[in-house]
Amino acid sequence: MTAKKEGNLQWVEGLRGIASTLVWITHVSRAFDYDLYSPTSGEGLTPRLLQLPFLRILIQGRLGVIIFIYVTGYVCALKPLGLFRQGNYEEGWASISKSTLRRLPRLAYPSIMATTISWAVAQLGLYQVAKQTDSYYLSQTAPEKLPILSAMRNLFINIVNTWTGAGNKYDVHQGTLFVLLKGGVFVLLFISATAKVRSQFRMGAALVVWGYYWYCAEPYFMQFWWGVLMNDLHNSRLFLRISRAESGFLLVLASFFMITGLYIASYPESNIERATWSDWQHRTLSMILPKESEFPKFASGLGFDLVTIGGALIPSYKGLLSHPILLWLGRQSFAVYLLHEFIGSKALKAFQVNLGGAPIMTPTLVSQSPLKLHNHVLLRARGPSQVRLLRRVCLCAATAMLILLWLPMGLPINIQKPHLAQYYSPSLQNPQAISQGQFPRKIWQTWYHIPPFFEKQEMERVRSWTESNPEWRWEVLTNANELEYVEDHFGPRGFNRPDIVEFFRTVNSKIVKSDLLRYLIMYVEGGLYADIDVEALKPIHEFIPDGFDEADIDLVIGIEADEPTFKDHPILGLVSRSFCQWTFLCKPQLPVMIGMVDSAMARIHTLAKEQGVPISEVKMDFYQVIGSSGPGLFTDVIMQYMDENRSRDSPITWDDFHQMDEATLVSRVLVLPVQAFAAAQTHSRSGTSHEVPAALIKHHYGASNWTSQHARFKHPVYGEVERCLFDNACVNQWDRNVGTYKYYFSKEKFD
């Protein structure tokens, strides 16, 4: 990987140094301040310094990976093409053969060492420190400590999986090494096949392959061929003439390419619509990129390609990239890349939080001496290459400590980010306002058919939302794209919650998935959620009555059932006091939303344990669904959230909402009276008609047949008590009848 071994140039080494630095910085910033990956921290907020175009490239890191891939393509072609241009074909092919055989060991040996170090750290329990930080990016990527035999087997499996594309759990970022290996071999095959082709035709062929991977939506693989193309271009007569020219026009043209490229590479990872510049970028890229593309990676790739064109027009670019500091960083680049996840993210975050006053280390961890691990490694390090690697590890550690001391003084980083994913336990306290300003102007719905197959009535109900709210964007997720959405936003490139992704993949109940999906969407996006069978009667802006400021509200909900008299009833108690879950307004990254997901997973895991089956085989009746993921859970979590964030001494109870006639704001949650979202139920003082001023929506109760798969309790003689609609006389009669039936049935059986 060094310049000497690859016949490389100094400026390429400097480029590697830039790449490794960008990759290291991005994982530190991702661990500390995930907000930086959006154009602003919230709707209507002013962007922070590192959220601005151009500057945000420093923390995004994608450009670093693009550079590594580009350099791989460039360097793989460097020596063979140089020999081919001289007519030394045999030596050129011999060089390709040697490079191919050496490529895997050069990548694999350091990778195995880094994986083993990470494995040892996990087995010593040191990753438990990272798991106790507030960053879920760290806590969910930190591997678990395992029994020694299982751990050794797991180590071997992950070392092998690095080179099969299955991923390495001890260092998830080593997946890029497999891409580098595969792409490098493809480049060497391409060069071997085009050895006797003239340079301009080989450049054309490389451009065709580049375009092919564009069409295949493979933004990373495109860069291998761009490296081959630029290698030929740098050695062409045209480039030699340009490098000797002294023209102001070339400088202007180069500046244009480089500024445009850096602007494109600034494309954010999430919440694109929050800023005009990023929304414009998204619309432009949507017109030229293949569907279902990874826009952030494509933007970085296209931006970097334009930067390389601009650099080729400036003769002095090689001198700039050959600066001694960049060369030094380049020589450490591979070691930094392999160790940046452990040192740059987990260790730094753990120490930073610890210095900040949080007692995150257990006594066991504190009492362990880090020298034990160092001595163990030193005893096994016998060759000069191992010693060099250990030196680089120490240098990385020293750099981490310097940045550790500098961070609190120089960088506006907020250690406690309440809007990052938080578990339901132990609390849902929200000490700071999550969002300010308006609710995101988005309407979200879910459906288990693709939109063209909507029934006429569904289309009419959808139209009621879009026509009454033309300034709001309408979105629908179906069973065809729901898993992809969850994987994208809660996988490694999103909030990094593999437990959520795995649970969503595994759970077999469609209604549970529907419940989870609405909470996940609202956590990520915010806006309005409505079931597909809900009709809008009034515009969304009327959901917030006069006298309330939208900036003071994070969540708008309505009452569904208000019959506390039946709270102790064995069947009706669960549904006697509840908030509407079929429609609500929410601002993004609200802890209560992710709390619902975590609580739902915990409750369903408990059911699975009680039934002695895996999650995929859990059986739930109607009431278990209601309580595990539906309105019962929705109400429980919101009540806890409001109580934990109350501004008064007395607790928040259902009495605060019983027989409520007007909206009330509690802990930044606006609760609407029952007629707003649940009119015409004939119970809970909801009336019998939607033709009342307070009614905002109409629920048609016809979008799903989930109750047929999760049955209610139905007595063989007296039927369902729910049909009483909370009528006291009816419920009491049903209870007496069922009790009498049970008594006589038991007596006859006994006799």
Image (cartoon, rainbow, N blue to C red):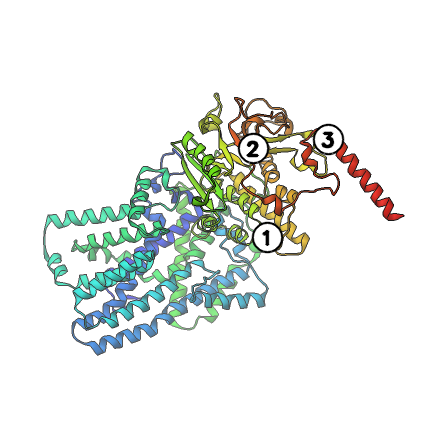
- Circle nearer the N terminus (2, 3): 2
Question: Residue 529, image x and y in percent?
Answer: 49, 37
10 Å neighbourhood of mark 1: few (<14), some, or many (≥20)? few
- Relative to 534, 748 lies left or right: right
10 Å neighbourhood of mark 3: few (<14), some, or many (≥20)? some
The type of residue carrying mark 1 is Pro
Q: Which residue is the site of mark 1?
A: 363
Front of the two marks 2 and 3 = 3
The type of residue carrying mark 2 is Asn
Front of the two marks 3 and 1 = 3
Task: Determine the CA span between mark 2 and mark 1.
Answer: 32 Å
Task: Determine the CA span between mark 2 and mark 3.
Answer: 39 Å
Q: In the rendered view, tell whether residue 45 sits above or below residue 204.
A: above
10 Å neighbourhood of mark 2: few (<14), some, or many (≥20)? some
The type of residue carrying mark 3 is Cys
Judging depth in this view, the residue of 733 and 621 nearest the camera is 733
Where disc 3 sits, the SS reads helix
Where disc 1 sits, the SS reads helix
- Relative to 488, 508 lies left or right: right
Disc on res. 645: 2
Residue 336 lies in quadrant: bottom left
Q: Which residue is the site of mark 3?
A: 730
